Amino acid sequence: MENYQIVEFFEERKIYCAFVADDRGERLHVVTEHNREVNLPRKRVIHAAPWSAGASLSRHELVERLRAVGARRETLKQDINLFELWELLVNETEGLSAADLARTWYGDGVTSDQIAALGRALYEDRFYFKFKGNVWSPHPPEVVEGLQEQHRREEERRQELKTAAGWLRAAWESGNITDPHWRERLLTVLQNMAVHGATHEDYELGKAYLEEAKLFKPDTPFKLLVKLGVFSPDENLDLHRYETPQDFPAEIQEAALALCQKTAYPDPFAPWRVDLTGLQLFTIDGERTRDFDDALSLEKIPEGWRLGIHITDVSTYIPLGTPLDQAALERGTSLYLPDRRIPMLPEALSENTLSLLAQHPRRAVSFLVNLTAEGEIQNYSILLSMVQVSKRFTYHEVDYLLAQNERLAALHRLTACLRERRLSQGGVQLQFPDVTILTDASGEVRVEIEDTETPSHELVSEAMILANYLGAQYLAERKVPVLYRSQAPPREELEKVETGSLFQLWQNRRRLSRVLLDLEPQPHWGLGLPVYTTISSPIRRYLDLIIHRQLFAALCNQPTPYTREALEGLLTLLEPTLRRAALLKTRRLRYWLLKFLSQHVGQKFSALILEKHPNRYRLLFLDILLESEMPAPSGHQFQPGETIFARIDRVVPQEDVLKVSLA
């Protein structure tokens, strides 16, 4: 017979048998029951005993016998009831060895296998006994209860992970979660992960679910939500992130519809309203515009011309404090994103009842400005009116008709004079071109750059600036509480912009001071005006609706709806909302421009060097007006204002990732 030592040790939460082939002091060279050779530290041994094996047995035969020992001990372990053993010993204060416990359970004359079996039971079930200093001691009853409760929770957690992982795998493979409870639960977790990332409290839980399903990657939550039909492939996560209202509640839609269906609606200003439906009004807007805030008219008078700027009356249809008013206040502004519109008011109102549609009589506030032939303002009046638009024009149509239509040509000439006078008073023109995103049925993205300094754009812009200025002046002279827009002079002197110089335009725009909202009338440096507010878009901007309410009351010598204190409170509410809306527009445009570039990875685009830094350059892609960073290439030096070609190396639109290099 050959004498060996048989040992037991833990590996990956399981107990295995092995025989010692060589004792190397602090380590034992062992052969396991799975025929693996292991250098085992002594401290990992949990049981050891002599083992007699048959003489001249092969290693394979020794391993087979070893495997039989392990199986025998597992069988013995199944018959051990640790609860009963604990009940016998719960009042013991002295620690006991595994051999002592085996004798208590089996009686005297216990075998090595019985001691090892009891040891296995003790190591695998720690509810009843604790191991310390090479001896086992019974836990007090309250500790046993606590450990069992903890184990129950851990088992529930393991089962939860397993179930969640199963449903996530099903969703990944089939795009469906059929269990309503788990669908709702997992959708909530996945949405919080996709929208808020690691900052959300659900992130670690969702990560554990996905890791259990062997699916975890940073973009997996988003991809799963697309597979499940909850998100579109181009989902605007910022709308979820900033909890932007997207759809109107049913009660608001119903209120809007009821308002549209009324044949007559009370007009608190009826005694002051003037019938101007005899004027030839026209709108000038973009081809896709559906909510028309403003219209223009131009009459020849003995002194020159009478320019009419007519703004739709929203305030008499949306009284202060009504549910529709509260819904508009919550939104603060209409959002015009490249891929969708989120109106401030329901479309039934913004695109119908309140919109200055051709051939439909509408309430309005009209600014009638008498101008000389040279465009000098002689006098003006502000009237509450009833108007009717005769004709709708697009910007492109007006640009085409200017050479043929005498009235439009005169209007352009007059507004150009107004613009020149305003710029001579210190105003500046720093308008960047508009970027338009177009997609076709196949999902391909196209980018168009639209010049916003065409005659038609300048004509409309100047007319609206005039109305806003005159409204602000009227209210300031009467000390009516109003929210004004002001702008301080720039921190640095602006450079003279050469025609077509995007670089100088970009530099000058960065030097401008922020436009501020305040209750005190202050100059607006960029417009070259002593006072300014906005009145021209009450369908689209809540601030304009506020000004309308104050203006209407002032025109009719009635108490104003808002006190100074009320406006201060509204300003506190609206400023964060408007900043968020501006951020949403900027980020969404950037997303679609990145989407466009993702179709052109590996291609090169012309880019303007905006800034030079030690290890990088800031670029502006000229074809799409998108800013980007580029690592400084070795062996090349560029200066701001130079044009280069940059190659698109990697784009991940949803993660705002753009990697470019010198082409």
Image: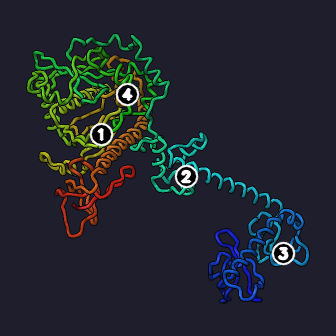
The residue that disc 3 covers is 96
Q: Amino acid at mark 4?
A: Ile
Q: Percent position (x, y) of residue 25?
A: 67, 89
Above-or-below relation of 131 to 497: below
> Would you call the spot at circle 1 few (<14 residues within 10 Å), some (14-19), or many (20 or more)?
some
How packed is label 2: few (under 14 Cα within 10 Å), some, or many (20 or more)? many
Query: Which residue shows up at 22% across the image and 26% down it?
Result: 284
Residue matched to label 1 = 439
Q: Earlier in the sequence, mark 2 or mark 3?
A: 3
Which comes sooner in the sequence, label 1 or label 2? 2
Can you identify the residue that label 2 sits on?
206
- Kindly identify the residue that appears in the image at 36 percent across and 27 percent down: 545
Give the Cα separation between the discs numbered 2 and 3: 44 Å
Q: Which scheme is used to colour this image of the protein? A: rainbow
Q: Quick check: 9 left or right of 455?
A: right
Residue receiving disc 4: 546
Q: Nearer the viewer, mark 2 or mark 4?
A: 2
Of pointers 3 and 4, the one earlier in the residue sequence? 3
Q: Residues within 10 Å of mark 3 (few under 14, many from 20)?
A: some
Occupied quadrant, residue 460: top left
